[in-house]
Image (cartoon, grey):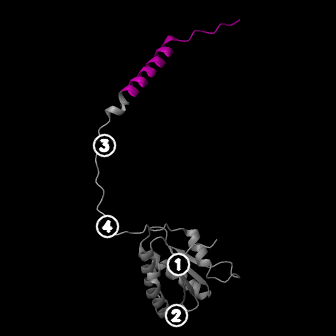
Amino acid sequence: MTATPPLPSRDFRTAALILVGIAAALALAWRAPSDLPPPVAVSAPAPGPAVAPAAAFDLDTAMRLAGTQVPPDLDSFYFFAMLEPAPEAQDIAELGSKMQAAARERDYLGVAGPDPERNRRTLLAALEAHHGEDLSGMILIYLGPDQHRAEVASAARAAGVELRFVAYPEASPPL
């Protein structure tokens, strides 16, 4: 029969030292609730004009809303979503390229993103950059606040583009 050798005593000493160290660290770090500093009084900001919270942009909802403007027999359409913080010049060039493709294919192009002002500026700049080109085959679906309707409609008309304007985020998603 073989006997198991006794465990070295230094293993027990090391374990005991580690436990004592942990206990000491916890004791030093713990503060009783009465030791906490008193709460600091913070005054409420002065009331300002009531502003409705901005609705969060939802890409799925935006694409579904744009899809309501496309005939049901079409199974796809172009969609340009300005989601990433890219330079506006890059977005203008990419949107312009999508507009040209949609016009060539006589297709629909949806445009949306979480920042309505950026969307408006980018679309208007892309239409201006392609002024004089034949974009008449494209049907533009713009999702944005109703206050952009007149300006976007005017720019689309000047470019010879049919516009389908969808109020977003005011529009409710289809069920």
Circle 1: element type: strand
In the rendered structure, find residue 111 and report the number of the disc placed on it.
1
Compared to residue 14, the image places residue 31 above or below, namely below
Disc sitting over residue 160 in the figure = 2
- Contact between marks 4 and 1 (CB within 8 A): the answer is no
In the picture of the structure, the residue carrying the numbered disc 3 is 39
Residue at 39% x, 69% y is: 51
Q: Which residue lies at the image location 48% right of the left edge and 13% below the top edge?
A: 10
> How much space separates mark 3 and mark 1, taking CA atoms?
49 Å
The reply, left or right, for residue 4 in relation to residue 43 is right
Whether tag 1 and tag 2 are in contact, CB under 8 A, the answer is: no
Taking the image as drawn, is residue 132 in sight? no
Q: Residue at x 29, y 39 (%)?
A: 38
User: Counting residues from the N terminus, which is met first, the one under dot 3 or under dot 4?
Assistant: 3
Question: Quadrant location of residue 122?
Answer: bottom left
Q: Residues within 10 Å of mark 1 (few under 14, many from 20)?
A: many
Q: Quadrant of residue 77?
A: bottom right
Q: CA distance from mark 4 to mark 2?
A: 44 Å
Span colored in magenta: 1-27
Q: Mark 1 and mark 2: span between their CA atoms? A: 17 Å
Residue closest to the eye, 36 or 90 = 36
Q: CA distance from mark 4 to mark 1?
A: 33 Å
Q: Which of the two labelled residues, at mark 4 and mark 1, occupies the earlier sequence position? A: 4
Numbered tag placed on residue 48 in the rendering: 4
Q: Position of residue 116 (x, y in %)?
A: 45, 75
Quadrant into which the C terminus falls = bottom right
Amino acid at circle 2: Gly
- What kind of residue is marked 4? Gly
As helix, strand or loop, the secondary structure at mark 3 comes to loop
Q: Where the N terminus falls, by quadrant?
A: top right
Kind of element beneath mark 2: loop
